[in-house]
Image (tube, rainbow, N blue to C red):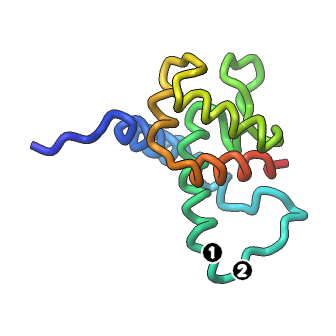
Amino acid sequence: MTTIPRPAVFVRLALLASALCGAQPALSAEPAASAPAAAPAAAPAAQHVRIHAAACTSCHGPSGRAPEGSTIPSLAGRQQAELLAQLQAFRSGARPATVMHQIAKGYTDEQLAAIAAWFANVR
Protein backbone atom coordinates (compact mmCIF):
# COMPACT_ATOMS: atom_id res chain seq x y z
CA MET A 1 0.00 0.00 0.00
CA THR A 2 1.35 3.41 -0.95
CA THR A 3 1.15 6.16 1.63
CA ILE A 4 0.99 9.81 0.70
CA PRO A 5 2.87 12.33 2.90
CA ARG A 6 0.48 14.46 4.94
CA PRO A 7 1.21 17.82 3.23
CA ALA A 8 0.58 16.20 -0.15
CA VAL A 9 -2.77 14.90 1.09
CA PHE A 10 -3.88 18.40 2.09
CA VAL A 11 -2.72 19.88 -1.20
CA ARG A 12 -4.53 17.19 -3.17
CA LEU A 13 -7.68 17.66 -1.10
CA ALA A 14 -7.51 21.42 -1.64
CA LEU A 15 -7.09 20.94 -5.39
CA LEU A 16 -10.00 18.53 -5.48
CA ALA A 17 -12.18 20.88 -3.45
CA SER A 18 -11.33 23.84 -5.66
CA ALA A 19 -12.11 21.81 -8.78
CA LEU A 20 -15.42 20.65 -7.35
CA CYS A 21 -16.35 24.19 -6.32
CA GLY A 22 -15.49 25.52 -9.76
CA ALA A 23 -12.77 27.80 -8.41
CA GLN A 24 -10.16 27.02 -11.05
CA PRO A 25 -11.86 28.81 -13.96
CA ALA A 26 -11.63 32.05 -11.99
CA LEU A 27 -7.86 31.60 -11.91
CA SER A 28 -7.55 30.93 -15.63
CA ALA A 29 -7.62 34.64 -16.38
CA GLU A 30 -4.48 36.69 -15.94
CA PRO A 31 -4.23 38.04 -12.37
CA ALA A 32 -3.86 41.70 -13.31
CA ALA A 33 -5.11 43.41 -16.42
CA SER A 34 -1.94 45.51 -16.61
CA ALA A 35 0.42 42.55 -16.19
CA PRO A 36 2.72 42.00 -19.18
CA ALA A 37 2.01 38.96 -21.32
CA ALA A 38 4.10 35.96 -20.36
CA ALA A 39 6.70 34.72 -22.82
CA PRO A 40 5.80 31.43 -24.54
CA ALA A 41 8.58 29.61 -22.63
CA ALA A 42 7.12 30.86 -19.34
CA ALA A 43 3.63 29.56 -20.11
CA PRO A 44 4.09 26.15 -18.41
CA ALA A 45 5.51 27.86 -15.32
CA ALA A 46 2.56 30.28 -15.24
CA GLN A 47 0.18 27.33 -15.48
CA HIS A 48 1.86 25.66 -12.50
CA VAL A 49 1.47 28.85 -10.46
CA ARG A 50 -2.24 28.93 -11.34
CA ILE A 51 -2.59 25.33 -10.20
CA HIS A 52 -0.83 26.02 -6.90
CA ALA A 53 -2.91 29.17 -6.38
CA ALA A 54 -6.10 27.22 -7.12
CA ALA A 55 -5.38 25.05 -4.10
CA CYS A 56 -5.62 28.16 -1.92
CA THR A 57 -9.02 29.19 -3.27
CA SER A 58 -10.86 26.32 -1.64
CA CYS A 59 -10.46 28.11 1.69
CA HIS A 60 -9.53 31.69 0.74
CA GLY A 61 -12.27 32.10 -1.87
CA PRO A 62 -12.28 32.38 -5.66
CA SER A 63 -9.23 34.30 -6.85
CA GLY A 64 -8.22 34.66 -3.20
CA ARG A 65 -11.22 36.77 -2.22
CA ALA A 66 -12.74 35.29 0.93
CA PRO A 67 -16.48 35.71 1.47
CA GLU A 68 -17.50 38.70 3.53
CA GLY A 69 -17.48 37.88 7.24
CA SER A 70 -15.13 34.93 6.83
CA THR A 71 -12.53 34.30 9.51
CA ILE A 72 -10.16 33.17 6.75
CA PRO A 73 -8.41 36.21 5.26
CA SER A 74 -8.51 37.28 1.63
CA LEU A 75 -5.23 36.99 -0.25
CA ALA A 76 -6.01 39.01 -3.36
CA GLY A 77 -4.08 42.24 -3.71
CA ARG A 78 -2.04 41.91 -0.52
CA GLN A 79 1.66 42.74 -0.60
CA GLN A 80 3.81 39.93 -1.99
CA ALA A 81 6.39 40.28 0.80
CA GLU A 82 3.65 40.05 3.45
CA LEU A 83 2.10 36.95 1.88
CA LEU A 84 5.47 35.26 1.47
CA ALA A 85 6.44 36.04 5.07
CA GLN A 86 3.18 34.50 6.32
CA LEU A 87 3.62 31.39 4.19
CA GLN A 88 7.18 30.93 5.42
CA ALA A 89 6.07 31.45 9.02
CA PHE A 90 3.42 28.76 8.61
CA ARG A 91 5.93 26.37 7.06
CA SER A 92 8.54 26.90 9.78
CA GLY A 93 5.96 26.62 12.56
CA ALA A 94 6.59 30.18 13.75
CA ARG A 95 2.92 30.96 13.11
CA PRO A 96 0.55 28.36 14.54
CA ALA A 97 -2.35 27.18 12.40
CA THR A 98 -4.86 24.40 12.06
CA VAL A 99 -3.85 23.28 8.54
CA MET A 100 -1.75 26.01 6.91
CA HIS A 101 1.47 24.80 8.52
CA GLN A 102 0.92 21.40 6.86
CA ILE A 103 -0.08 22.86 3.51
CA ALA A 104 2.88 25.26 3.38
CA LYS A 105 5.32 22.42 3.98
CA GLY A 106 4.26 20.92 0.65
CA TYR A 107 5.79 23.79 -1.34
CA THR A 108 9.35 24.87 -2.15
CA ASP A 109 10.61 28.41 -1.48
CA GLU A 110 10.20 29.18 -5.18
CA GLN A 111 6.63 27.89 -5.25
CA LEU A 112 5.70 29.93 -2.16
CA ALA A 113 7.20 33.05 -3.75
CA ALA A 114 5.27 32.40 -6.97
CA ILE A 115 2.00 31.89 -5.08
CA ALA A 116 2.58 35.11 -3.11
CA ALA A 117 3.31 36.99 -6.35
CA TRP A 118 0.18 35.56 -7.98
CA PHE A 119 -2.16 36.75 -5.24
CA ALA A 120 -0.37 40.09 -4.91
CA ASN A 121 -1.22 40.73 -8.58
CA VAL A 122 -4.89 39.81 -8.33
CA ARG A 123 -6.95 42.98 -8.54
Q: Dot 1: few (<14), some (14–19), or many (≥20) neighbours within 10 Å? A: few
Q: Quadrant of residue 77?
A: top right
Q: Quadrant of residue 60?
A: top right
**Dot 2 amino acid type:** Ala
Which residue is labeled 1 in the image?
Answer: 43
Do callouts 2 and 1 mark residues in contact (Cβ within 8 Å)? Answer: yes
Question: In the picture, which quadrant includes the N terminus?
Answer: top left
Q: Dot 2: few (<14), some (14–19), or many (≥20) neighbours within 10 Å? A: few
SS for callout 1: helix
SS for callout 2: loop
| 76 or 29: nearer the viewer | 76
Residue at figure coordinates x 70%, y 46% from the top left:
116
Which residue is labeled 2 in the image?
Answer: 39
**Dot 1 amino acid type:** Ala
Residue at figure coordinates x 58%, y 21% from the top left:
94
| 19 or 59: nearer the viewer | 59
83 lies above or below 30: above
Residue 99 placement (x, y as % from top left): 48, 24
Q: Which mark is residue 97?
A: none
Residue 54 placement (x, y as % from top left): 58, 48
